[in-house]
Every structure is written in structure tokens, then in C-alpha cells.
Image (cartoon, rainbow, N blue to C red):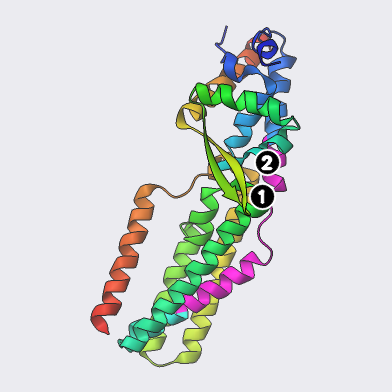
């Protein structure tokens, strides 16, 4: 059975990391809107991913207001690639 | 909620991983297609590049302090436009895309680089020959071609954002920096 990364398995986390793979850095509010989740839910997901070293979080300023920016790290990029490959193998296995 | 998610069983049915992947891809594509460029980016880029190229060609051919000042003013104007584009893109979309800065603004894409180099050589030759109408034409063609290269990159990014989100490699950036320094040194020595 292909090994799945439990940390990325939650749909919101998989989607967040997939979105982050398409940009260099995303603002917290942009990610929240894209995922259609609340601030607190996204905050928990991001904290868990940051603790694992999958994303990096920094504070910044955008249009005069304080913002939080999130970047996918190289470790996170590799974890995402491996997880997606495992999911594909799982699909192939069942097919 | 988080603990509930973490304790969820891993997908065992074929539709689970399939739908998980499809949902993630949809979320990424939704974001990529929702990104907007600052209005009038391509015409502004074409004019900025044409002005920079014309000013640089004049500066190289003139070999005077005034020529150097004109070339530097052209470069400064272009860098100002480039910085404005990057800041506005971030402000409009709430994301940063390094590929945008390096390919659209620094012209690291193949088409933009080739068009720029070809047009710059033509404009500089024309400036040495004092054929000013040809300097203007070459700079205009260079600006338009460069902008076309940027437009093509943007379309390619929207089709495959993961492959193109990253910017130019440190090696390419170092080469560009060296080229800029050499150009500046030639201008200073010649003036």
C-alpha cells in the first residue's frame, strides 16, 4: 500500500499546499478565500504545516495593513510531490 | 476539528484519492485563473522597454556624460515601472509570483531575451550611424517583441502555474547582474 502523508491528507491542507505550489508566496486572506474556510481553521492548518517545516510564515504589510504571508518550503514541496504520487499509486492499485 | 481531521482514516476507496486530487487541482486552477495583471501592463512594458533601449543606444553611441545620463535615466525609468508592476500585482492578488518578476520584468524568457538583444544591437548600430528614425523603430520593435514574450509567459503560467511560478535561477540572475555591470562600465569608460 502506498504511504500517504497524514499531515497533508486533510483536504484543506492538501488544497492549501497545492495552491501554494502555484505561487511563490500567498497572503493569509487570499488562501482563506480560495479554500473557503474561516480564519481559525486556516490558522490551525497553517500552524500544523509550519511546525512540520512544510510552510514558512512571515509577517508583512500590504496596502498599509499588517498581513501574514505563507510560502511552501522545499521540504513541503517534496512532501506534496510524494503525497500526490502516493495518491496516484493508490488509484492505480485499485483500478 | 484539527484532531478530528488528523484521526480520519486514510482513503481506501478509489474515489477518495481521486476526488481529493481533483479538488486540490481545482483549487489551484481557480486561484491561477483568478489572478489579474495590473491594467495596461503590456503596453506600459513595451513603452518602458522601448524608452530604455532607445536611451541606452543613444548613450552607447554618444560616449559622453550626457549620453551616460540619458542611458541611466532610461534604465531608472524602466526599473521604476518594473517595481510598480510587481507591487501592484501583489496588492491586487495577494500573492507573489517570482516567475512574473524575472520573466516579465527582467526578460529572462527566451523570446524576450532574443528580441531585446536583436533590437538593442540594431538600435545601437543605428545610433552610431545617426539614423535616429531607425533607433526609434528598433526600440519600438524591441519593446513590442519583449511585451509579446511577457504575454506568452503569462498565458503559459495560467496553463501550468506550478512549473512557471518560480523565478529565474540564481545563475541567470548573476549573469544579468554581470551584463548590467559590464554595460554600465562601458558607458562610464566611453563617456
Which quadrant would residue B152 be assigned to in this image? Answer: bottom right
Q: Is residue A68 above or below residue B4?
A: below
Image spot of residue A9 (x, y percent): 63, 17
Labels 2 & 1 near each other (Cβ < 8 A): yes
Question: What residue would you read off at disc 2?
Answer: A30
Image spot of residue B49 (x, y percent): 51, 72
Q: Chain of mark 1?
A: B
Residue at 54%, 76% in the rendered image: B141
Range of residues picked out in magenta: B28-53
Of residues B72 and A70, the one nearer the viewer is A70
Disc 1 element: helix
Of residues B43 and B115, the one nearer the viewer is B43
Q: Chain of mark 2?
A: A
Which secondary structure type mostly characterizes the magenta part of the structure?
helix
Based on the picture, tell me whether residue A74 belongs to the magenta stretch: no
Question: What residue would you read off at disc 1?
Answer: B93
Disc 2 element: helix
Mark 2, residues whose alpha carbon is within 10 Å: few (<14), some, or many (≥20)? some
Residue at 67%, 37% in the rendered image: A31
State the CA–CA distance, disc 2 to disc 1. Answer: 8 Å
Of residues A89 and A64, the one nearer the viewer is A64
The quadrant of the image that shows the N terminus of chain A is: top right
Amino acid at each position: 500500500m502506498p504511504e500517504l502523508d497524514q499531515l497533508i491528507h486533510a483536504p484543506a491542507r492538501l488544497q492549501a499546499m497545492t495552491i501554494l505550489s502555484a505561487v511563490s508566496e500567498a497572503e493569509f486572506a487570499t488562501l482563506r478565500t480560495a479554500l473557503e474556510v474561516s480564519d481559525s481553521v486556516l490558522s490551525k492548518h497553517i500552524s500544523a504545516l509550519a511546525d512540520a517545516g512544510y510552510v514558512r510564515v512571515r509577517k508583512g504589510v500590504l496596502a498599509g495593513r499588517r498581513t501574514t504571508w505563507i510560502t511552501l518550503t522545499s521540504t513541503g514541496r517534496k512532501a506534496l510531490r510524494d503525497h500526490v504520487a502516493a495518491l496516484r499509486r493508490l488509484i492505480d492499485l485499485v483500478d | 476539528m484539527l484532531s478530528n481531521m488528523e484521526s480520519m482514516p486514510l482513503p481506501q476507496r478509489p474515489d477518495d484519492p481521486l476526488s481529493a486530487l481533483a479538488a486540490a487541482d481545482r483549487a489551484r486552477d481557480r486561484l491561477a485563473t483568478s489572478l489579474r495583471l495590473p491594467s495596461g501592463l503590456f503596453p506600459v512594458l513595451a513603452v518602458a522597454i522601448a524608452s530604455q533601449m532607445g536611451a541606452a543606444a543613444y548613450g552607447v553611441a554618444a560616449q559622453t556624460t550626457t549620453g551616460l545620463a540619458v542611458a541611466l535615466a532610461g534604465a531608472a525609468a524602466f526599473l521604476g515601472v518594473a517595481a510598480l508592476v510587481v507591487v501592484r500585482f501583489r496588492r491586487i492578488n495577494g500573492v507573489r509570483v517570482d516567475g512574473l518578476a524575472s520573466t516579465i520584468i527582467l526578460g529572462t524568457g527566451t523570446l524576450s531575451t532574443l528580441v531585446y538583444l536583436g533590437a538593442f544591437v540594431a538600435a545601437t548600430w543605428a545610433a552610431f550611424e545617426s539614423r535616429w528614425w531607425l533607433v526609434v523603430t528598433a526600440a519600438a520593435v524591441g519593446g513590442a517583441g519583449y511585451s509579446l514574450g511577457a504575454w506568452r509567459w503569462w498565458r503559459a503560467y495560467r496553463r501550468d502555474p506550478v512549473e512557471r511560478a518560480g523565478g529565474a535561477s540564481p545563475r541567470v540572475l548573476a549573469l544579468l547582474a554581470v551584463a548590467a555591470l559590464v554595460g554600465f562600465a562601458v558607458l562610464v569608460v566611453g563617456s
